[in-house]
Image: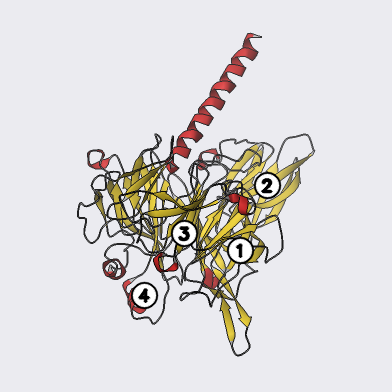
Amino acid sequence: MIKMKTISLLLLVLVSNTFLLFSQEAKRNSVWPIGFQPVVKFHFLNQFEIDTVENYLKPVAPGCAILNAGCAISDFDGKLLLFGNGYILYDSNGYGINNGVYINCPKGNVLADYYGGVSLFAQSSIILPKKGNRYYVFSTGMSDSVANNYLNHSWSEFDVLSYCLVDMDSNNGQGKVIEKNRILSEHQHYVNCAMSAVKHSNGKDWWLVKADCLQNRYQEFLVKEDTIMGPYYQNISTVGDFCTFPSQLYFSDDGTKMASSIYGDILNGPTSPFYYYNRVDLYDFDRCDGSISYKQHYIVPYDTSTYANFDFKHGICFSPNGNLLYMINNYSIYQIDLQDTAVHNALFIHGIDTLLAYFPRYDLAACAPDGKMYIGNWNGTRKYMSYIDKPNIKGLGCDFVAQGVWQPYTNLLSPPNMPNYGLGADSSIVCWPLSSSEIGAVRSEMLVVYPNPAFTSLTIELTSYKNRVVPLEMFSMVGELVLKTEIQSQTNVQINISSFPKGVYVIRCGGASEKVVVE
C-alpha cells in the first residue's frame, strides 16, 4: 500500500510538473509587439491590456521598429523578451540587441537599406527557443544581386534562408547576437517569405517549414537544442498553376494541419488566361516525422471590379479548434468550413470596416491566447484594429467586431509571426527516437548489426528470444520509419539499403537499439 501511494504521489508530481512546463511555454505567446511610432504591446496573460514599449524612439541604425512583419517571444512569466522587425532585433524595452542590426543580411544589405531596416514581407522571420535563455531567429532574405533585380522590377524572389543565435544572458542580461547570418540555404528561388514552425511530437524540438513554391515542395529543418538538421524536402503533387508573392503558412493549434496560400490558379478567360489568386491548400501534418500530405484546396471569391486594388488574399488563419479557416483579403473576410470538402464553401463574413476612403486594407491575422482573432492593417494609418470575437463558431455567429480595438499610442499594423510555443508532446502516437540521447541507450549483445558503416546492405543478427519472430524497425534521425519487417531470432537477415540516402539511422529490434551509418 505504501509503495502504491508513493508511485501515485510521484505520478502526481510528474503530471503537475509537466502541466507547469507547458503552462510556462504557453506564456511565450503572451505579448504581441505591434505598430510603430511608438511600438505597443498587446498583453494577453491575465486580461487584455495595451501599453507602449518604453524606448521606442531610441535610434537604432539603419531604421526603427516598425512591425508589420515582426516576430516576438516572451519569457516563462509572460513578459516580452525579444522581438524583431526582419532586420533588427530589440529587447523588451525597445533597445537594439547588441550585434542585432543587419540580421537577415548574409549576402548584403541592399534590401535592408532600401526599406530603412524594416521588412515589409509577411513571415520573413520567426523566433524559436534553443536551450536555456538562447534563441534562434530564422529569416528569409535576398542577396544583393537578387535585391537589385527586385528593386529594378525585373524579377521578384527571395534566395537566402539564414539564422542568428541570441543569448539573452549576455551583455549583463541585455542580450547579444552571438552568431549572425549563418546560412541554411542559398541560391534558392523562393517566390515569397512564407515560413512557419510547429513543435515536434516530442514536445521539445521544432519543425521549421519554408515554402519553396517554384519547386512544388516544402523545405523542412528539424531544429534541436544542439543542432539544426536538414533541409528535408516534401514534394507536393497537387498544386496550383502559379506562385503568389503575398503568401503564408499557418499551423492549426494542435499542429496536425497546415494551411498554405502560396498558390493561385489560372482560369481560361474569354480572351486570355485569368490569374485567380484566392486559393488556399490544406495539408495533414505529422509532427513525428514531418510529413506533409495534401488533403484539399479551397477557392475564395476574388473581386476584381469593385475596388481600385483587386480583392486578393493577404492572411490565412485557423480557428483555435482547427475546424475553420479564415482568409483575409484586401477588402473582405471569408470563413472556410474544413469539414466540408466543397471547394467553394467559403462564407462571406465581413467587408470593409469603415468608409472606403479611410480604409487601410486588411492584412495578416492571428488567433491570440484570449481566443479572439485579430486582423491587421496593411497601411498603418489608424489606431484601430478589427477582430473576430468567437472564431470557433461557424457562420456569422463568429461575431466580427469592426474597429473593436482602439488605443491612443500608435498606428496599428499586423500581429507578429509566432508559432504555438505552448504546444506539448503528442502522447497519442509513438514517435521514436525521441531525441539523440535515446539513440543506443538500450543496447544488447543479442542484437548485432554489421557492417557499420554500411554501403549497400546490412546484416542483422538476433541471438535470443528462443527461435521466435521479432519485429524490426529502422528509423531516420528525424524519427521517420523507413523500414518495418520481422526477423527470426537465432538467425540473421540481410537488408538492402542501396536506395537509402546517406546518413545516420537507428535500428530497433527485440527491445534494443543500434545506430548505423549509411554511406
Q: Is residue 356 left or right of residue 474?
A: left
Q: CA distance from mark 4 to mark 2?
A: 45 Å
At 61% from the left and 43% from the top, the residue drawn is: 432
Q: Furthest residue to the right?
A: 468
In 3D space, how far apart are the residues under numbered discs 3 and 1 (Cα atoms)? 17 Å
Left of 190 or right of it: where is 36?
left
Provide the secondary structure element on which disc 4 rests.
Answer: helix
Viewer-closest of 393 and 189? 393
Q: Earlier in the sequence, mark 3 or mark 2?
A: 3
Q: Which residue is mark 3?
A: 364
In-image side of 141 versus 424 (left or right): left
C-beta proximity under 8 Å, tags 3 and 1: no
- Gap between marks 1 and 2 measured at Cα: 33 Å
Closer to the camera: disc 1 or disc 2?
Answer: 1
Whole-Å distance between the Cαs marked 1 and 4? Answer: 28 Å
x, y percentage for residue 169?
A: 29, 39
Which kind of residue does numbered mark 2 sit on?
Glu
Residue bearing mark 2: 473
- First in residue order: circle 1 vs circle 4: 4
Q: Are marks 3 and 2 in contact (CB under 8 Å)?
A: no
Residue that appears at 46% across and 38% down: 25
Q: Earlier in the sequence, mark 4 or mark 2?
A: 4
Callout 1: SS: strand
Q: Which residue is mark 1?
A: 281
Secondary element under disc 3, as helix, strand or loop, is strand
Image-quadrant location for residue 134 = top left
Q: Which residue is mark 4?
A: 146
Q: Amino acid at mark 4?
A: Val
Percent coordinates x, y for residue 347 in the rendering: 63, 61
